[in-house]
Each structure stands twice: as structure tokens, then as C-alpha cells.
Image (cartoon, grey):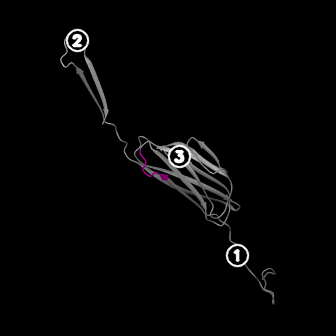
Amino acid sequence: ATAACAAVEGSAVAGFDLVRPLPDLVISKTALPASPANGGGVNYRLTVSNIGNATLTSLLITDTLPIGFNYVGESHPSWMTFANTAGLLSWSGTVTMGFGKNYTVTITGQASLCLVGTVSNTAWVLGRYVCGEQQKSVAANFNLSAPVVPVIAVTKAFTPSSPRFNMPVTFRVSVANN
């Protein structure tokens, strides 16, 4: 045995295990309402939490907006910087994010008028800490049903019903959305 590891008679040797600190990022995302009307408002709410034993020193959240979602605005914590580059939204910043801390960003938009089906959207989070980084993703969906198609009815009438030569005639055109 080496001198560092040898037991010396009459002395006690104590040991301990080093546990590597690791963050445990949790990202959740909801689309509200889950079934908006075509052309109606939709909010994506992204919440990032750290349930690990390492403190994050920086955070980056990205979200590429899906077809069928028209961006209107967003809100985020004041320490984050926001960018929108052709539908790629990102929030970033330096942070001290220890165990149990969470932050939320909200994206406000409008559902497509003409799209039918499920609109799926994935967000990513990247957290950096003293020993490395961790990345997670999450998706949220909303469903669009077939848009209501207007049924237009057009009617035309004239008076008198049997006009004579050089007699004034009045036309009445009615349009209705049935």
C-alpha cells in the first residue's frame, strides 16, 4: 500500500464520497386553449425548473414557431434577453438558478384561420453550470378543427314585376351569410 492509503496503527482513517453536482432541468409547455377557434388566440407557456443539486449559471430557451401559429408577442423575466429571428424565438441570460427555482416565458399568438389538425411545437432549454451543461426539450399541441365555411345566399328582385316600356324599375339585391 502507498503511504497515502496505508493504515497507521492507532489512527483512524476517514473517507467520504464526492458527489458530482448535477442540475436536473425540467421544462414544461402548455398551449392554452387546447382547441382554439380558427383565428383565435393561443398562448404557449414555458416553465423551466431546476430540481438538481447544481446551480445553473446561464440559461438559453429556444422555440421555433410552427406553421399555423401567428406570433403576436411574448413576456419573460427581466434578466433574460429576447430575440425573434424569423420565427425562431430565444431567451437567454446569466442566472443563479439553484434547486427549486423556476422561470416562465409566455408566447402569445393567433391560430391559423385555414389550417385543420394538430399544431405541434417543441421548445428547448440549455442550462450551463460549473461542470458542464444540460439540455432538455418538450412539445405542446393545440388542435384546430375545420374552419366554418360561410354559406352566402344572394337574391335579386325587381319592381314592378311586369314593367312597361320607359317605366322605372327598381332592383333589390340581398346578400345573407347563412
Of tags 3 and 2, the one toward the viewer is: 2
Disc 1 secondary structure class: loop
Q: Amino acid at mark 2?
A: Met
User: Which residue occupies the foreground of this view, 143 or 12?
Assistant: 143
Position of residue 37 measured from the top left corner of the image (x, y, whole percent):
41, 45
Query: How far apart are the alpha carbons under marks 2 and 1?
Result: 107 Å
Instruction: Report whether 96 appears left or right of 36.
Output: right
Instruction: Report whether 163 appears left or right of 143.
Output: left
Please name the residue that numbered disc 3 is placed on: 108
Instruction: Report whether 152 appears left or right of 83.
Output: left
Q: Amino acid at mark 3?
A: Thr
Dot 2 surroundings within 10 Å: few (below 14), some, or many (20 or more)?
Answer: few
Q: Earlier along the polypeptide chain: callout 2 or callout 1?
A: 1
Q: Earlier along the polypeptide chain: callout 3 or callout 2?
A: 3
Position of residue 120 measured from the top left corner of the image (x, y, whole percent):
47, 50
Residue range corresponding to the magenta coloring: 31-37
In this view, the residue farthest toward the top is 166
